[in-house]
Structures are given as C-alpha cells and as structure tokens.
Image: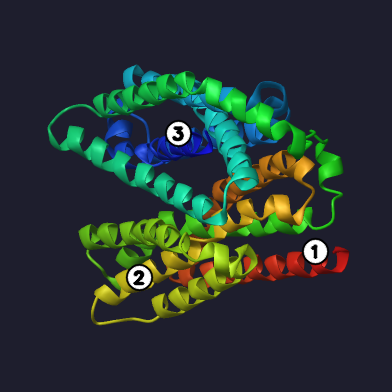
Amino acid sequence: MYTLLLVIIYIAFISLGLPDSLLGSAWPVMHRSLDVPISYAGMITVVISIGTIVSSLLSDRLTKKFGTGLVTLVSVMLTAVALFGFSFSQSFIMLLVFSIPYGIGAGAVDAALNNYVALHYASRHMNWLHSFWGVGASVSPYIMSYFLTGGRAYTEGYFFVSLLQIGLTFILFMSLPLWKQSRRVSAADEHYEPIALKDTLKIKGVKFVLITFFGYCAIESTAGLWASSYLVEHRGVPANIAAQFASYFFIGITAGRFLAGFISDVVGDKRMIRYGSLIILLGISLFMFEYRSHSMYMISLIIIGLGCAPIYPAIIHSTPVNFPKRYSQSIIGIQMASAYLGTTVMPPLFGFIVSVSTIGLFPVYLLVLTGFMLFFSEKLNQTLKLTA
C-alpha cells in the first residue's frame, strides 16, 4: 500500500512543480498580449503568494478534517481550474481572479504532502520527491516554449498544462481508497491534533525553524530571479548565455536533491542543512570574482544550487523529529507560510536595493541571507539540545 501511495505522491510532486515556472516563461509574451506593463507580473505573484500563505496556515485543520488524500485532490483540482482559467483569460483582471484558486491550491497540497512524507517515509524519499518537483518546474517552460516558438499562443501552453493537472486530478481521485486505508492504519500512532498559531509559536525552537526556512527560500528565490540580470548588467555576459546559466542553478538543485537522497539517511537532516549551507557559501564566494571564462559563473551557480538542494527537504523531514509529532502538520503549515513569505518579500527587496545602489551587491546579499539562515539553523540545534 505504502509503495503504491509513494508512486502517487511522486507524481503529485511533479504536478506541484509544473505551474511554478509557467508565468515567468510566458510573461514576456503575456504582458504584450494583455497590453499591461511588464511589472504587473508582480501583482499576480503577490495574489498567488497570499493564497498559498493562507491555505498553508489552514492546512492543519483541513488535513485533520478531510485527510491528506482529499486535501491533495481538491488542491490539485483548484490549480487545474486556475491554469484552465489562465488559458482563456483575455484581461489582466481575469488573471488576478484565477490567481486566487492557483495560490490556495498550491499552499494546501504542499503542506499536506510534505507532512505526510515526513511522518511516513525516510529522508531519502523527501529529497527525491523534491527532485521530482524540480522536474515539473523544469519541464513546464519547455512546454510553453514549444507553443510559443511554434507561432501559437501562450494560452495553448496553459491549456496543455491544465490538461496534465486534470489528468493528475483523476489519478488522485482513483487513489482516494489508498489514502483512506493509510489514514486508518496510521491513525493509532500519529495522535495528530491541530493547534492554534499562537500556541504553535510558543513551542521551543519553532520560531528559529521558521526564520531558517524564511532565509532558505529567500536565497533560492532571489538567486533564481536575479542571477541572470547580475551576469548581464555587472559582468557583461551576453543575455542569451546568462539566461542559460541561470537555469543551471535549478539544475544544480534538482540533481543535488537526487544525489542527496542516497546519503541523507546516513548523514542526517541536521548535518545536511549545515553542509548545504557551507556549499552555498562556497558557491557564492566563487561567484563574486570576475572571470575571463564565462563558464566559471555557470560552475558557481551549479555549486550554489547543489548547496541549496538538501536544505528544504531536510527542514521538512526533521520537523516530526524536532517537535511533537501530533503538531507536525500545524508546524509544517506555518513553515510553508514562512517559506512563501521569504519568496515573496526578499527578491523585491533586492530590487529596491538595486534601484538605489547597484546590482553588483547581488553576491553580498546572498551571503548575508545564507549567514542569516545558518545562524538561526544552529540556534535551533542548540535550543533542541537544551530541551532534549
């Protein structure tokens, strides 16, 4: 039962990644078609982020009442509806409307699935599952590119991905009996109970893990958004090459999570976070120098991606170990909200810094964020050691 369910979860993680990079790949065409400024993409991402934060905070109560299977099914169905809506929206207002179910669906399923895997499967599966998220996030730009380079509309790309999500919704619907059986089997040893936000924050170490997660997602999202612009504006790398190099950051994350799966059970989540942070610092340090060969920037970005790879899965997987299992869904839900907050706030903050200073501060900004994350990760370890 658990093996078949794991296969379903792997497929669901690909689904989680599919919508995440669609907007970025389609927006250069979308904003012209809709006759809105290119900056309006920020409004869409803010609406999506608000939805994900709200649904992440509610995930504990939803999962307790309806179970992981049904929450996952409804969440994926909401993202399918949102993507389908994007495929026929002819106005920016309609995009904002469909961004609401987009965000709500993404947040709830992310928190529910991550908690389920953290409770029931080994650390290696958490790494491999998030590697499959990377597969989904890498595939969707190619799907969009296929339609755009073929002279077709971006709406067809959204429509195709919405069909994939609808197909997954059907698979999840057919798998509901598996989830129900799993819920009966595990109910006796989970003792799961929802807990209020203010009470969750009082648990020793929770605030530190939230800040750590905020810091990590700030690093990942800032690097993904600004690396290409830094290479073009500050290092003189041609735009087409810089765009390719920026993609290697995500390739580093995807490949790194696949490789981390083979060692994470032996090394342990705590050390995976520590070693990953140190590798990020190494990659950023290399990225700060000027090179005659552009390939060194690519290698530096891959190293940063490899360092990022194990941190997200390790933080999630260690939650039921670091804190009472019965509160893990509540804590993971808040962690996801903190993650989305870091993703939403910190890249625009660097944009503001660029507007008043220089984009040359990009590596310094990443160094500060990484040091911030590592500091609070170690504070968490110290706190847990004292309360053990």
The residue beneath circle 1 is: 384
Q: Which residue extends farthest left?
A: 150
- Which mark, residue 234? 2
Disc 2: CA contacts within 10 A as few (<14), some (14-19) or many (>=20): some
The residue beneath circle 3 is: 8
Q: What is the three-letter code of the residue carrying label 3?
A: Ile
Q: What is the three-letter code of the residue carrying label 2?
A: His
Q: Residue at x 32, y 56 (%)?
A: 247
Among numbered discs 1 and 3, the one appearing first in the sequence: 3
Horizontally, residue 271 falls left or right of residue 329, namely left
Horizontally, residue 151 falls left or right of residue 56, namely left
Q: Where on the picture, by quarter, is residue 104?
A: top right
- 194 vs 88: above or below: below
Q: Residue at x 65, y 42 (%)?
A: 337
Colour treatment of the image = rainbow
Q: Is residue 74 visible?
A: no
Q: CA distance from mark 3 to mark 2?
A: 44 Å
Q: What is the three-letter code of the residue carrying label 1?
A: Leu
Q: CA distance from mark 1 to mark 3?
A: 34 Å
Disc 1: CA contacts within 10 A as few (<14), some (14-19) or many (>=20): some
Which percent across, then down, holds residue 149?
Answer: 15, 37
Among numbered discs 1 and 2, the one appearing first in the sequence: 2
- Indicate the secondary structure of the residue bearing disc 2: helix
Among numbered discs 3 and 2, the one appearing first in the sequence: 3
Tell me whether the residue at label 1 lies in contact with that at label 3, contact meaning CB atoms closer than 8 angstroms: no
Which percent across, then down, holds residue 138?
Answer: 33, 47
- 179 vs 125: above or below: above
Which percent across, then down, holds residue 83?
Answer: 39, 25
- Indicate the secondary structure of the residue bearing disc 1: helix
Q: CA distance from mark 1 to mark 2?
A: 43 Å
